[in-house]
């Protein structure tokens, strides 16, 4: 944990990232009185806080996950409020629906806490916008130079070609991915003319939230839908959380179904093999290495605080390039892994090209999918 002073607008406490002059926390992992939430993934939005503040489009997922009766105050993007002399506003993070960066201004300082973010627009949420600040708190989930995502059009050309080939062969295509954010991104980009799209019960309620927010998603079916016969299922694309892998639910699609895993971790050798799937698609809702560097540069910040992921690597790189970079120790997980609440492998040295060493820690998935 980096050393901090009371002059800092955000410090690390056992409960989470704390703003002393404002007396509130950002994405606390232990219950507090006032919590500012960057997005509704469960490692950033936890139960038990007395009062929540979040972006307006997060309301549906937050109430679904934390309870309809939570005390929730919402803001539009760029709307400003003042609390105990701290000017606070929320700005697009491009991660999932309603995801936001938190801008704080007090005593002549401006700090921005990124939450999770990605820099390529995907059509399912407001795209990332760099916010000028003195100090930037950034995630580093994929903070290694090997992580470089394919452009979205190329990614979906690959997914659609895979699905189309399987449909022609009469084999159901199954994509395992995170139920909130990743699943809706897959839905928004695939060619729905190839066949019907079937979604797991953990995915459809979140689809409803996206549709209510005006995000265009193709029609989807549940596996029990009477409109689907066996022939239709053989042409179908199935979207399910990784926790569904190996369950009786999956057996409905037959032994010849072809499965794939969608995650940024699929760029690393050995991940697909350990997941036990036929195909891996490199798809992440987090920034890759170039995205992290461009986001940090876009803020103009001279001071950077780095949270969860490959923290030592990014901190070292930033310090070597003239910035004041330090680590913030946090308890955030890895929603990109989609492990359904189980611990999953972090970037380990044996998976990386020679000369690149991971941080030696396992990333813990923040979501428990029913």
Image (cartoon, rainbow, N blue to C red):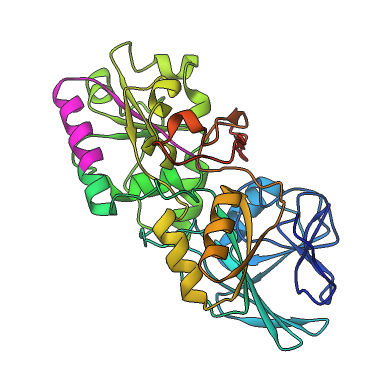
**Does any portion of residue 116 appear in the rendered image?**
no
Image coordinates for residue 284, horizontal then vertical, percent:
42, 47
Q: With 112 as the anchor, is 70 left or right in this view? A: right
Residue lying furthest top: 255
Image coordinates for residue 125, horizontal then vertical, percent:
44, 61
Residue lying furthest bottom: 108
Image position of 162 with respect to 40: above or below = above
Residue lying furthest left: 168
Image position of 40 with respect to 360: above or below = below
- Find out whether residue 27 is within the magenta segment: no
Image position of 185 with respect to 10: above or below = above
| Residue at 62%, 49% in the rendered image | 308
| Residue at 44%, 38% in the rendered image | 265
How many marks are shown on the rendered structure?
Answer: 0
Question: Which of these two is toward me, 157 or 71?
Answer: 157
Image-quadrant location for residue 165: top left
Quadrant the C terminus occupies: top right
Image coordinates for residue 92, horizontal then vertical, percent:
51, 69
**Does any portion of residue 140 appear in the rendered image?**
yes
Question: Which of these two is toward me, 52 or 15?
Answer: 15
Quadrant the N terminus occupies: bottom right
Q: With 242 as the anchor, is 341 left or right in this view? A: right
| Residue at 53%, 26% in the rendered image | 243
- Find out whether residue 161 is within the magenta segment: yes
Question: Which of these two is toward me, 140 or 259?
Answer: 140
Image-quadrant location for residue 169: top left
Image-quadrant location for residue 361: top right
Image coordinates for residue 270, horizontal then vertical, percent:
40, 26
Question: Which of these two is toward me, 307 or 199?
Answer: 307
Q: With 173 as the anchor, is 50 left or right in this view? A: right
Q: With 208 as the anchor, is 252 left or right in this view? A: left
- Range of magenta residues: 158-179
């Amino acid at each position: 944990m980096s050393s901090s002073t009371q002059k800092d607008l955000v410090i690390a406490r056992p409960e989470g990232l704390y703003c002393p002059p404002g007396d509130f926390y950002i994405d606390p992992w232990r219950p507090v009185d006032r919590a500012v939430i960057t997005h509704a993934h469960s490692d950033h939005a936890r139960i038990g806080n007395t009062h929540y503040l979040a972006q307006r489009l997060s309301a549906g997922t937050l109430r679904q996950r934390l309870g309809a009766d939570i005390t929730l105050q919402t803001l539009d993007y760029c709307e400003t409020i003042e609390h105990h002399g701290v000017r606070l506003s929320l700005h697009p993070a491009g991660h999932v629906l309603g995801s936001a960066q938190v801008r704080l201004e007090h005593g002549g300082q401006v700090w921005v806490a990124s939450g999770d973010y990605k820099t390529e627009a995907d059509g399912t949420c407001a795209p990332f916008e760099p916010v000028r600040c003195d100090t930037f708190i950034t995630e580093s989930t994929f903070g290694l130079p090997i992580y470089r995502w394919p452009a979205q059009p190329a990614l979906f050309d690959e997914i659609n070609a895979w699905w189309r080939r399987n449909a022609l062969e009469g084999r159901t295509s199954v994509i395992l991915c995170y139920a909130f954010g990743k699943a809706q991104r897959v839905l928004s980009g695939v060619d729905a003319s190839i066949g019907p799209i079937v979604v797991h019960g953990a995915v459809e309620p979140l689809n409803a939230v996206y549709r209510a927010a005006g995000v265009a998603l193709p029609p989807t079916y549940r596996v029990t839908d009477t409109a689907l016969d066996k022939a239709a299922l053989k042409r179908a694309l199935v979207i399910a959380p990784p926790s569904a892998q190996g369950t009786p639910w999956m057996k409905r699609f037959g032994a010849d179904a072809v499965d794939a895993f969608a995650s940024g971790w699929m760029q690393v050798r050995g991940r697909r093999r350990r997941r036990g799937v036929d195909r891996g698609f490199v798809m992440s809702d987090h920034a890759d290495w170039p995205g992290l560097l461009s986001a940090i540069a876009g803020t103009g910040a001279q001071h950077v605080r780095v949270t969860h992921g490959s923290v030592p690597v990014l901190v070292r790189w930033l310090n070597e390039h003239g910035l004041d970079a330090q680590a913030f120790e946090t308890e955030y997980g890895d929603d990109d892994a989609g492990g359904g609440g189980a611990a999953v492998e972090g970037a380990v040295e044996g998976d990386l090209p020679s000369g690149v060493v991971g941080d030696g820690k396992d990333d813990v998935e923040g979501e428990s999918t029913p």
